[in-house]
Amino acid sequence: MQNIPLQEAQHKLPELVALVEQGEDIFILGDNKIRIKLVSCTALPKKRVFGQHRGLATMSEDFDKPLPDSFWLGNDESFS
């Protein structure tokens, strides 16, 4: 992982791109705070597929049952 000041990054962009392509994490600083993270496009999440996880999540039969007043008043510790 490398932290590079913005002024320095402007002059080293080709070198920084090469490092990112090799798997290096590059953070560009502005005002001594991380402002930008350079990432490779290959690191981006893949497109989601509808129905890919069908059947993996379940929901109880009473999921839409009204919650007790104690929940809304902050007195019900079973929901903490």
Image (tube, grey):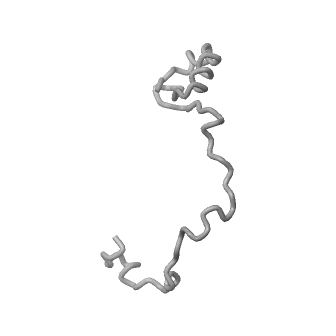
Q: Which residue is at the far top?
A: 11
Q: Is residue 41 above or below residue 69?
A: above
Q: Nearer the viewer, residue 37 or 51?
A: 51
- x and y percent of residue 7 in the render? 57, 17
Q: Is residue 3 visible?
A: yes
Quarter location, residue 52 = bottom right
Q: Is residue 25 above or below residue 5?
A: below
Q: Nearer the viewer, residue 32 or 60?
A: 60
Q: How many marks?
A: 0
Q: Nearer the viewer, residue 62 or 48?
A: 48
Q: Is residue 27 visible?
A: no
**Is 40 displayed left or right of 64 in the figure?**
right
- x and y percent of residue 3 in the render? 48, 24
- x and y percent of residue 75 in the render? 31, 78
Quarter location, residue 40 = top right
**Is 77 displayed left or right of 51 in the figure?**
left
- x and y percent of residue 25 in the render? 51, 29
Give the residue drawn at x 68%, y 57%: 49
Give the residue drawn at x 60%, y 38%: 43
Quick one: quadrant of the C terminus? bottom left
**Is 50 displayed left or right of 71 in the figure?**
right
Give the residue drawn at x 36%, y 82%: 70
